[in-house]
Image: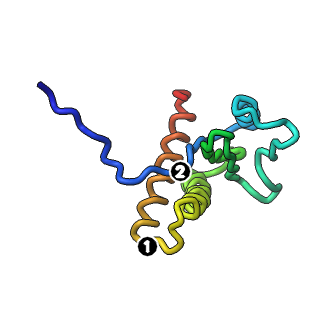
Amino acid sequence: MTITWCNRSLHDNTYYVGLCTTELAFQKELKRLAVPRNEWPSFISTKQAHATCHFFEKDDGKKIALVCIGSMSGRTGIEIAGLLIHEAVHIWQAHHEDIGEHRPSHEFEAYAIQRIAMNLMDAFEQTLKGTT
């Protein structure tokens, strides 16, 4: 007989989070998600923005956050990490509103943002390696 280990996570994000590093990948995902073409947002929300988080809710209630990051040409790793952390905060803000947590503890908030940001950074690293 063997031990079956359980997932250590105590709390799941209400959003499925994806990272898009190209406009083409973003458009393919919108098509796959069956988002009506006339409702497609811009890959990056404004000319001043370098990253954007788009939120969608499917008919089945599934919530999706797609983080889009623009050109990385000339950006340092620290700048990219900063952009991903910024978007992680937006995901956290949406999540804690969804669960009715209007005054989360500072520690809960810090760990949640850390986890979301780490997941985004891992996805970014996988994209660079071509493993996604």
Say if 29 sits above or below 55 in the image. above
Q: Is residue 47 left or right of residue 79?
A: right
Q: Position of residue 113 (x, y in %)?
A: 49, 60
Q: How are the residues colored?
A: rainbow
Residue at 30% in and 47% down:
8
Q: Which image quarter holds the C terminus?
A: top right
How far apart are the alpha carbons under marks 2 and 1?
A: 19 Å
- Residues 10 and 129: in front is 10
Residue at 52% in and 27% down:
131
Q: Is residue 68 left or right of residue 128?
A: right
Q: Residues within 10 Å of mark 1 (few under 14, many from 20)?
A: few
- Residues 89 and 108: in front is 108
Say if 111 sits above or below 65 in the image. below
Give the label, 2 or 1, closer to the camera.
2
Mark 2: secondary structure: loop
Residue type at numbered disc 2:
Thr
Q: Which residue is mark 1?
A: 106
Q: Quadrant of residue 58?
A: top right
Q: Position of residue 17 (x, y in %)?
A: 57, 44
Say if 28 sits above or below 108 in the image. above
Mark 1: secondary structure: helix
Q: Which residue is mark 2?
A: 14
Report if residue 124 is visible in the image.
Answer: yes
- Residues 28 and 13: in front is 13
Q: Position of residue 83 (x, y in %)?
A: 62, 56
Say if 18 sits above or below 92 in the image. above
Q: Residues within 10 Å of mark 2 (few under 14, many from 20)?
A: some
Q: Is residue 52 left or right of residue 84?
A: right
Q: Earlier in the sequence, mark 2 or mark 1?
A: 2
- How many dots with numbers? 2
Residue at 61% in and 46% down:
63
Q: Quadrant of residue 59?
A: top right
